[in-house]
Amino acid sequence: MKKMLFSGVIAGMLLFFISYGGLFLAIKFFPNLFADYNNPLFNSDGDRDFLFYTHAFVISMALSWFWERFKGLFKGVFIIRGLEFGFVYAMVALVPVMWITFSALDVTVLMVLTWLIYGFVQAVIAGIIFAIMNP
């Protein structure tokens, strides 16, 4: 349990810094991609901003639990285990969520694809951390 919690917190911190650093870099280098976010769908009054900023920790703790339950299924060196972990997460969770999101909300295909890639990368990074810290 300690390994699961500790690796989840470490993954959360790393994902937090990578996610927000990557967001600022992406806005700087791909500003046209983010023009679609000037949509009332994405406007917040600020009451729930804390939830947005804690996302990296919520996802890392959920992925840490998932890793603990199924880590025996992932074989090979830590990078391969992390990639496979990210792929499984993307196929089982992200693809269905992105499907329903695209079908129900006024978002573009490009937005959904970037969210899918972003979630996959998060899971791969978390999987590599888990494979190293909690083999």
Image (spheres, rainbow, N blue to C red):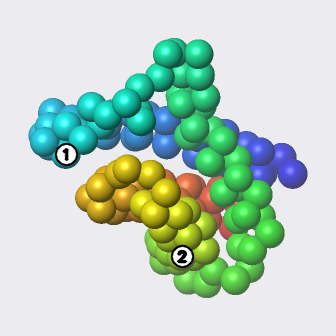
Q: CA distance from mark 2 to mark 1?
A: 24 Å
The picture places residue 57, in percent across and down from the top left corner, at 62, 38
Label 2 with label 1: CB-CB less than 8 Å: no
Residue at screen point 54% across, 76% down = 91
Q: Amino acid at mark 1?
A: Leu
Q: Amino acid at mark 2?
A: Met
As drawn, the label of residue 17 is none
Residue at screen point 54% across, 21% down = 49
Q: Residues within 10 Å of mark 1 (few under 14, many from 20)?
A: few
Viewer-nearest residue: 82 or 105:
105
The residue most toward the top is 46
As drawn, the label of residue 33 is 1
Residue at screen point 70% across, 47% down = 61
Q: Is residue 26 above or below residue 63?
A: above
Residue at screen point 49% across, 57% down = 104
Viewer can see residue 104: yes
The residue most toward the right is 1
Q: Secondary structure at mark 2?
A: helix
How many numbered markers are drawn?
2
Which of the two labelled residues, at mark 2 and mark 1, occupies the earlier sequence position?
1
Q: Residues within 10 Å of mark 2 (few under 14, many from 20)?
A: few
Name the residue that disc number 2 marks: 91
Viewer can see residue 94: no
Q: Is residue 86 above or below residue 20?
A: below
The picture places residue 82, in percent across and down from the top left corner, at 52, 69
Q: Secondary structure at mark 1?
A: helix
- Closer to us: mark 2 or mark 1? 1
